[in-house]
Amino acid sequence: MKAATRQHRISMALCALGALAVAVHGPAFGDTPGLPSGLPELPSLSESMQRDVHSGLALRGYDPVAYQLEKRAVAGHPDYEIVHQGAVWRFVSAANREAFRDAPEIYEPAFAGFDASAVADGRAVDTDPRQFAIIGSRLFLFRTPENRRSFVEDASRLKTAEGNWGGVSQSIAR
């Protein structure tokens, strides 16, 4: 059997199983009866914080507090996570999780986690959470080292990005 045919059959079987699960348990949205209790609500379509569409993780699982405390990107742990504004945030410790819970506005990245340099250019672009800068006390994320360098070296880019953010945020698919 050809690989493409095998893959097609597997896809069809998975679709059939998914349809069966919906028929038996109903759609998996919000507080739908039949879902286990204690699950976080699914994010709404109006959420704008950048997150992984498959896992729901903000910052691809990096700890937003560690950027400030350790001045580096540190992967969070599944044991220390919370749901905030429709995204799952991970932390390296319970203390970091509580610090974020108490004051998320201090630790959330500027421009909802989109590339600050691209926002200055009027666009919303995905980022690599390992490419970051702390300017003042704000966390800025970037897609590439070049974007980071151009933003950090030209102070006017921050003012431009702040001016553009209203329009850019309206262009984000929600």
Image (cartoon, helix red, strand yellow):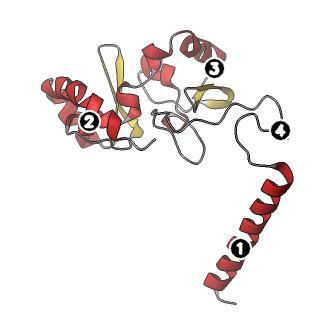
Can you tell which of label 3 and label 1 is closer to the viewer?
A: 1
Q: Nearer the viewer, residue 88 or 70?
A: 88
Kindly state the secondary structure of the residue where label 2 is placed: helix
Measure the C-alpha gap from mark 3 to mark 2. Answer: 31 Å
Residue found farthest to the top: 102
Classify residue 8 as left or right of residue 47: right
Q: Which mark is residue 119?
A: 2
Q: Residue at x 38, y 44 (%)?
A: 126
Pointers 2 and 4 in contact (C-beta within 8 Å): no
Image disc number at residue 12: 1
Q: In the rendering, at what x and y percent does residue 56 appear? A: 58, 40
Q: Is residue 108 visible?
A: yes
The answer for how far apart the CA atoms under marks 3 and 4 are is 34 Å
Residue 93 bears which disc, if any? 3
> Which residue does the image show at 41% across and 21% down from the upper left?
71
Of the image marks 3 and 1, the number of the one nearer the N terminus: 1
Residue 75 x %, y %: 55, 33
Residue 113 picture location, percent across and down: 40, 32
Q: Which residue is mark 4?
A: 33
For the question of whether residue 142 can be seen, the reply is: no
Amino acid residing under circle 3: Ser
